[in-house]
Image (cartoon, rainbow, N blue to C red):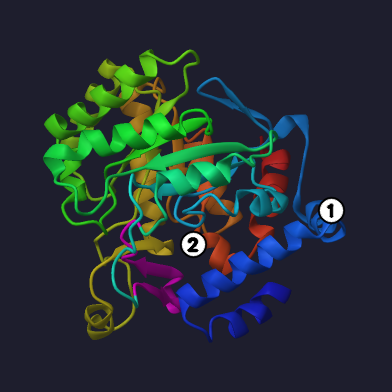
């Protein structure tokens, strides 16, 4: 109730400005030990019954923060106080890039949605590595990796490989992002030939490492089931450990606002409540198609406790939230974990 009142005030300001404000506030809290302790007591739910194993990793609970919020790995310590068991940083690219021109982040409040065309804005992998060197040992960190916008798709494997090599000592698992709609032609990397080239480079490098870390592939909600079948067959054959389902969508279905408003916002990936049905559909399809062999992180449209429970019931082993956190506030993580304790 308090957050809903506070949200009215926060939503007066532009979304990207508020993102910066919240990030600064969280870093401030993390720098003050009494405040950090207080926030942890308010939001963290810790019971053995919440623990999950995924791709050989042990998670203290099934709820994580999706990629896109902590692009530069400078917030994961602060956001761990909200009860997340893992944080996925990035998307990280080899070189620093500013992303697309502003404005590039839009709220659609009536539909509980966001549209973004950020464009992989980040400080580059070397800066991210410096931030990760301060990692806390009790947080699982995922590294979401991509290519620079200026890199041609034919040269994409080299970009993914550079990020993979440099991040390898500092993250616990990797997500190969080939499905973001906000980088020109990136989704074409989901074509089997392109995907195979990227995964070959990444997995061969992993084979040279002393310790094996999980590699996941993040897929688009906009692909057909026939294409998804091809991806699932390919990743299983190559030894990919799991799937992150799903990314944002270019579709504008399930929006109630006027079409002229949608046109005015322009291009970008849609997230939030309108994506809930599609995320559940794809996660359930993957479970059935692979007979549960391929573990899934479910992300997309998790706005409520019920959405998270439905995602787990559909076959996801873990869930990630982002837009739901913006609309429902930091207590969403705690509510989901408390509900899981009652149901599972």
Classify residue 96 by image quadrant. bottom left
- Find residue 341 and report its horizontal and vertical position in percent: 72, 39
Badge 1: residue crowd in 10 Å (few <14, some 14–19, many ≥20): few
| Disc with the residue nearer the chain's start (1 vs 2) | 1
Q: Which mark is residue 323?
A: 2
340 relative to 293, above or below: below
Which quadrant holds the N terminus? bottom right
- Mark-to-mark CA distance, 1 and 2: 26 Å
Residue range (magenta) = 104-120
Give me the residue at 22% from left, 79% from top.
263
Of 145 and 229, the residue lying toward us: 145
- Find residue 177 and report its horizontal and vertical position in percent: 32, 42
- Find residue 289 and report its horizontal and vertical position in percent: 30, 26
Of 341 and 139, the residue lying toward us: 139
Residue pointed to by mark 1:
37
Element class at badge 1? helix
- Find residue 250 and report its horizontal and vertical position in percent: 24, 61
| One can see residue 331 in this view | yes
């Amino acid at each position: 109730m308090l957050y809903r009142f506070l949200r009215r005030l926060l939503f007066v300001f532009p979304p990207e400005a508020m993102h910066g404000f919240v990030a600064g506030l969280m870093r401030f809290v993390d720098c003050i030990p009494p405040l950090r302790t207080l926030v942890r007591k308010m939001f963290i739910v810790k019971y053995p019954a919440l623990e999950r194993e995924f791709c050989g990793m042990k998670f203290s609970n099934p709820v994580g923060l999706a990629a896109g919020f902590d692009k530069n790995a400078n917030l994961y310590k602060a956001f761990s106080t909200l009860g997340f068991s893992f944080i996925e940083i990035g998307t990280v690219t080899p070189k620093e890039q500013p992303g697309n021109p502003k404005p590039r982040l839009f709220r659609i409040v009536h539909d509980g949605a966001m549209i973004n065309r950020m464009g992989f804005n980040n400080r580059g992998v070397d800066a991210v590595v410096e931030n990760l060197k301060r990692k806390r040992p009790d947080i699982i960190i995922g590294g979401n990796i991509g290519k620079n916008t200026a890199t041609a798709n034919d040269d994409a494997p080299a970009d993914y490989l550079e990020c993979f090599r440099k991040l390898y000592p500092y993250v616990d698992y990797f997500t190969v992002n080939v499905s973001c709609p906000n980088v020109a032609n990136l989704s074409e990397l989901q074509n089997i030939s392109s995907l195979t080239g990227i995964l070959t480079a990444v997995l061969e490098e992993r084979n040279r490492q002393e310790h094996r870390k999980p590699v996941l592939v993040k897929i688009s909600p906009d692909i057909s089931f026939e294409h998804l079948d091809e991806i699932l067959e390919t990743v299983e054959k190559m030894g990919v450990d799991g799937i992150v389902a799903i990314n944002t969508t270019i579709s504008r279905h399930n929006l109630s606002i006027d079409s002229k408003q949608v046109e005015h916002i322009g291009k970008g990936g849609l997230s939030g409540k309108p994506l809930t049905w599609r995320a559940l559909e794809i996660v359930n399809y993957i479970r059935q198609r692979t007979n549960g062999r391929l573990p899934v992180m479910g992300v997309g449209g998790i706005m409520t406790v019920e959405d998270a429970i439905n995602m787990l019931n559909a076959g996801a082993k873990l869930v990630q939230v982002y837009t739901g956190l913006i609309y429902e506030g930091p207590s969403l993580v705690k509510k989901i974990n408390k509900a899981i304790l009652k149901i599972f």
